[in-house]
Each structure stands twice: as structure tokens, then as C-alpha cells.
Image (cartoon, rainbow, N blue to C red):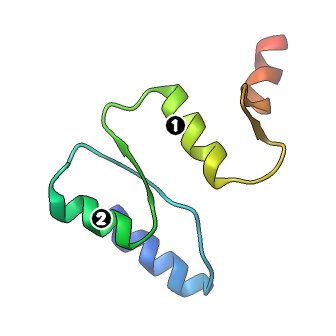
């Protein structure tokens, strides 16, 4: 089972939209179309930490993420 199947099953089971990030090295037209059809965020391997943070910030509303990155990482740096 791949990530797209897991996302579809999770969304069906919860009966709601769940944000999903697909991290893949497969850039075939079919794979990119499948990702787009399921309204998932797509990142190419290798993805940087900053790319992942930006993708999460787009998908997760609220103050946990800002333009400077997640607050949890900022808090760890202060310790």
C-alpha cells in the first residue's frame, strides 16, 4: 500500500479531509496526476527541512507554524 492509498483510506474512515504530504522521487506523469487528483501536497526527494516546514505550514492552520518556522523548533533552540 502506498501513501496515496493510505491517505484515501484514512480520509474515508474519518469521513473528512486530512492534509497529506507525499514525499516521492517518482516524477512520472501518472504519479503526479494521482497526487493532484487526491489533493495532496507533493515534495520531491530529497526534500529539505525548510521545504517540509513550508509544506506543513500551508496545510496546518493556526499559530503552530509561522513564516519563521514551527514554534516547537524555536522553543528547542532556546533551551
Q: What element does badge 1 sit on?
A: helix
Q: Where residue 16 sits: x, y (%)?
A: 63, 81
Q: Is residue 41 above or below residue 9?
A: above
Q: Which residue is mark 1?
A: 52
Most foreground residue, 18 or 34:
34
Q: Earlier in the sequence, mark 2 or mark 1?
A: 2
Quadrant of res 2 = bottom left
The reply to whether discs 2 and 1 touch (Cβ–Cβ < 8 Å) is: no
Q: Where residue 72 sits: x, y (%)?
A: 77, 31
Q: Residue at x 75, y 54 (%)?
A: 61
Q: Is residue 14 above or below residue 62?
A: below
Say whether residue 40 is left or right of residue 67. Answer: left
Q: Residue at x 51, y 27 (%)?
A: 49
Mark drawn on residue 23: none
Quadrant of res 44 = top left
Q: Where residue 38 sits: x, y (%)?
A: 41, 72
Q: Residue at x 81, y 50 (%)?
A: 62
Amino acid at each position: 500500500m502506498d501513501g496515496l492509498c493510505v491517505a484515501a483510506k484514512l480520509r474515508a474512515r474519518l469521513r473528512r479531509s486530512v492534509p497529506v504530504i507525499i514525499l516521492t522521487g517518482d516524477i512520472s506523469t501518472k504519479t503526479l496526476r494521482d497526487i493532484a487528483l487526491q489533493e495532496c501536497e507533493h515534495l520531491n526527494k530529497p526534500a529539505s527541512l525548510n521545504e517540509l516546514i513550508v509544506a506543513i505550514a500551508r496545510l496546518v492552520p493556526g499559530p503552530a507554524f509561522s513564516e519563521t518556522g514551527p514554534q516547537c523548533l524555536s522553543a528547542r533552540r532556546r533551551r
